[in-house]
Image (tube, helix red, strand yellow):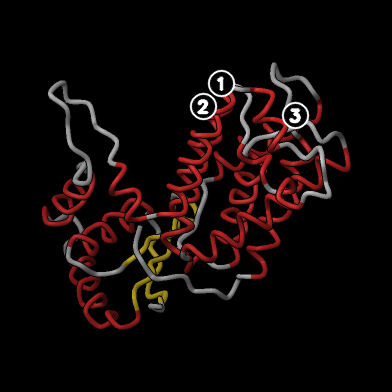
Amino acid sequence: MATVHKFAELNSAKAAQLFAAYCVAQGLEVNAVVQQPTLAELYGATEQLARIEQEFARFLQQPAHPRYQAAAWQLSQPDTQKLQDDGLPVFNWRELWRQAPLTSALLLLCLLVYLWQQVDWRSSSGALQLTEPAQLWRWFTPMLLHFSLTHLVFNLAWWLYLGRQFEQRLGLVMLLNVTLSVALISNAAQYFMVTPNFGGLSGVVYGLFGYFWIAGRLNPAQGLYISPGLVGFMLLWLLLGFFDVLWVSMANWAHLGGLLAGMGWAWLLRKHTGRGHAQ
């Protein structure tokens, strides 16, 4: 597992991201962790630090050089996606599976379960909801159930966004541990506080959100960061759910339980350096 080292701070988030993009294009493992628009920290792989610092000194002398803009443009291109004739990107499942197999597998499993629900709603719900607590698998399987297409897409979009980053930075085994433990805690919270008749991946999503939120503060070297705007949105969504003013019925206690569990994981792994891969 590669180690990372903080080697600089910049008072411009855009400049830090520009330099990190250039380094990645050069095969250097550099990650820019943005704290706010006027503050960003730069982390690099320890074994590459001498070369990274040379490149950083050159960047400080000529930050406006075209080489940096060219690298940022290159990385912004869909190099892992093919373009259709009409110019629309095609989702590259093979690349996603290579980068984040667990994220891909759970996404696929949720899609298959949703198809099963459309074919046989009663059997699928009866098999996966937490209606028989003595059957231990039921403490985990509600996360696979989704009760509308909107519910499914919302949760899977967040899972793909957060789970993929987590798996790339901390590995498949760690994501599996966090996912199962957060699912257990969030499902138990909803079961004991309200009802066994619920489902959805949102408890796990809130767990990952809580992890990113706290890890970005306790251990920026992991490179897992979520913007203040998204933090505000997720917390507001949680609060509105408890006040029951939304047009959908939500498993609010599962969300809260997942959030707290994810925050707890971030504290437990506060000294974990991650893999040192730049995002």
Identity, as a three-letter code, of the amino acid under mark 3? Gly
Q: Circle 2 sits on which residue?
A: 115
Q: Circle 1 sits on which residue?
A: 118
Instruction: Identify whether 274 is placed above or below 106.
Output: below
Task: Say if mark 2 contacts mark 1, CB within 8 Å.
Answer: yes
Q: Where is residue 228 shown, x and y percent of the image?
A: 56, 44
Label 3 crowd (10 A; few <14 / some 14-19 / many >=20)? some
Q: CA distance from mark 2 to mark 3?
A: 27 Å
Label 2 crowd (10 A; few <14 / some 14-19 / many >=20)? few
Q: Quadrant of residue 31?
A: bottom left
Mark 1 or mark 3, which has the lower sequence index?
1
Task: Name the residue nearer the viewer: 133 or 74.
Answer: 133
Q: Residue at x 44, y 63 (%)?
A: 169
Q: Quadrant of residue 87?
A: top left
Identity, as a three-letter code, of the amino acid under mark 1? Gln
Instruction: Identify whether 230 is placed above or below 102.
Output: above
Q: Where is residue 220 shown, x and y percent of the image?
A: 50, 65
Q: Where is residue 227 shown, x and y percent of the image?
A: 51, 46
Task: Name the residue nearer the viewer: 202 or 145.
Answer: 145
Nearer to us: label 2 or label 3:
2
Position of 81 with respect to 111 (left or right) is: left
Q: Residue at x 53, y 37 (%)?
A: 110
Mark 2 or mark 3, which has the lower sequence index?
2
Q: Where is residue 173 shown, x and y percent of the image?
A: 52, 66
Q: Quadrant of the N terminus?
A: bottom left
Task: Name the residue nearer the viewer: 45 or 109.
Answer: 109
Q: Residue at x 80, y 40 (%)?
A: 190
Instruction: Identify whether 260 is placed above or below 200.
Output: below
Question: Does dot 1 land on a helix, a strand or a loop?
Answer: helix
Question: Does dot 3 land on a helix, a strand or a loop?
Answer: helix
Q: Residue at x 74, y 28 (%)?
A: 240
Q: Quadrant of the C terminus?
A: bottom left
